[in-house]
Image: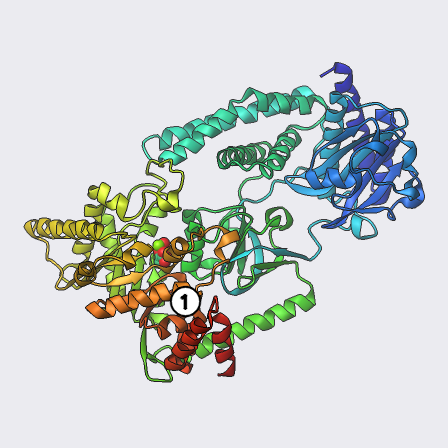
Amino acid sequence: MADSTESESRKLLGRLREAMAGDDAGQTRLDKITHLIADSMRTEVCSVYLFRDDETLELCATEGLNLESVHKTRMRLGEGLVGRVAKYGKVVNTPDAPNAKGFRYMAETGEERFSSFLGIPVQRLGEKLGVLVVQSLDAREFSADEVYALEVVAMVIAEMTELGAFVGEGAALSPLHQQPVLLRGTSAQEGAAEGHVWLHEPRVVITNPIADDPHRERERLHEAVDELRVGVDKMLEMSLDGDKEQVQVLEAYRMFANSKGWMRRMEEDIALGLSAEAAVEKEQSQARARMSQVQDAYLRERLSDLDDLSNRLLRILTGQGATSSADLPADPILIARNIGPGDLLEYGRSLRGLVLEEGSVGSHAAIVARALAIPLVVNAKRITTEALNGDHIMVDGDQGLVHLRPEDTVSSAFRDKIAMQADAQERYGSVRDLPAVTADGKRVDLLMNAGLMADLPSLESSGAEGVGLFRTELQFLVRNKMPKRSELVVLYKRVLDAGHGKRVVFRTLDIGSDKVLPYMKPTDEPNPALGWRAIRVGLDKPGIMRMQLQALIRAADGRPLTIMFPFVAQFEEYRAARAEVEKTLELERKLGHPLPEVLDVGAMLETPSLAFAPQKFFEEVGFLSIGGNDLKQFFFAADRENERVRKRYDTLNVSFLSLIERIVERCSSTDTPLSFCGEDAGRPIEAVCLAAIGIRTLSMRPASIGPVKSLLLRVDLGALRKIIADARHRGDQSVRPAVMDYLRDL
Ligand code: PEP
Ligand code: MG
């Protein structure tokens, strides 16, 4: 970059800082800076457009356009050149604006006289704040140096906006992070919660984006990067013999920390007048903007590594460390971009709710949030940039809505909802100890799904008759090392003890697909859901399976034991797994460990193929449990984690119910006990339909037992069965509408 550009830029930033130093009103400051920029860039026009709402930009200050149009000229996101800059977060640089694609004529501004146009997005860490524009009469394209210099100015304006420097009258100048915001995400765990924001990773605030002494700033940057490198190397040394994935992440960190390109760009930003921390953040903002456009998962992950690294660097430079959990509000609602299951468990039951900017319904964090029974909304775009620690927040896990800094009317309606839910819970409490017997006298056993120690208290409080599915992999997922057999014995013992003799169905390790153990070598499979997972891994790696079986037998210590194998797709797999159990029993007997008084071994039916297994399979298997989450995904060929297709197929689709009916018939012809343990078991309408077609054991999240039982007590399964048969006869796609009519009449 030319030295003259650097000194010009530093001079301009210096003047900007002076302009900001006084206690002028926001509008005056904006007017001053547009004047300064136009003067320094030798352009006739400089304008600042800021958002007045999510969709609308407003001209807030200008040098060179008609002053009457200030606060009057508005455009929608994507409209005109300015709208395009904002929408795509990309620079528009054209010598002939009136003939450029997307140009829109705004008569009131008088801008048609100006030929060249340079628009720069004003954004901070992925948050769109506005657009900075310079225009000139002569038809020239701005040079790369000029664009770069204006990007640096836009960065400073973004920081100033964040700090509240331009607060004034009107919506476009209203202070940031103080307005009520409604964010729509995806529901990942139902429930409503009110509380105060706690940011998992507190945001670093930069109070000094402009610096006078580039040498000093470069030194500061180098010192901080050195400290960062030493830290990363230390972490690498510590984790070399463990967690492979962590090592990979750290190696990527090291690569970035040593990246010449990254350093060079930050040094250039500093040469133009930014402070070291502002330079780091400018690069981080640009990486985030790229991240939002990259489709490739690998590249996205690398950009996200760079983002984490930038955060670390910012903390070193500003000394703003992670806040201590001692400051946690009394009613914390945790906000994070993403969070691992281990970190989430550390917060544990102190949390009222959880909102993730990314995440997915099937993620491990979601599984843990369900176990902790806290409302969870995922995919809540902008939440980490909008929310500030301590903000009042309401999370509607049923609808996937987040009300940040809600208005009073919203708060009071929301509180009514919470009160109604509390009432309903109380009502469910009154049926807790009743058996679930339907109006026509059919009994349905309601069990709970579990997987963490945090689930165990629910065995008592929910009125569950036992644990129908204990997902043993969760204990493996929340660690960063393979647990030892002795540790597993202790865990499984605690589970059985908490059951006080109630049946607990331990499902052996169900890993693979989305459940990747952090310490296992990742397998690069084109289609992991159809890949090497669950029992397939167990049979190919019998060492791990045997270790787990031994732990279960030892934990039972002579008590009855129930074991279930996941994802069995054909009879042979069950036979082979069963043979492993026999071998392990023999081994344990020889080692002198007491064997279970009763041993029940069953399988999950999660692939359509097993519904068509030979009769002999149904005779031999101890019991079957339908894993509806996977079964439905394979029946409809619709990824359970893909929001776009997941909801397209109704569980109450006649064809799917026919498959389940067939399984019921096959099991009843061989007297094979059958249950259903997918998420649908916990949805009251789905649950009563499953009961109507003959499923008499349902295993679900503890919180669902009350609502499911309440509805079961009121329905007539015979009547429902007829409604389902009629719907099928009519050729309905789903029985839901007919069933809803019946339920409404109840
Ligand atoms: C299922 O597939 O329905 C099931 C219960 O197993 P998971 O959700 O753990 O895959
Ligand atoms: Mg499954």
Q: Is residue 79 above or below residue 225?
A: below
Q: Is residue 665 above or below residue 473?
A: below
Q: Nearer the viewer, residue 66 or 566?
A: 566
Q: Is residue 737 above or below residue 481?
A: below
Disc 1 target residue: 682
Report whether 151 appears left or right of 631.
right
Report whether 368 appears left or right of 165.
left
Residue type at tag 1: Gly
Q: Nearer the viewer, residue 664 or 675?
A: 664
* Residue at point 93%, 45% (across, down): 68
- Ligand 1 quadrant in view: bottom left
**Dot 1 alpha-carbon crowd within 10 angstroms: few under 14, some 14 to 19, many 20 or more:** many
- Which image quarter: residue 214? top right
Measured as percent of width and height from the top left, residue 526 is found at: 40, 38
Q: Is mark 1 within 8 Å of ligand 1?
A: no
How has the structure been colored for display? rainbow
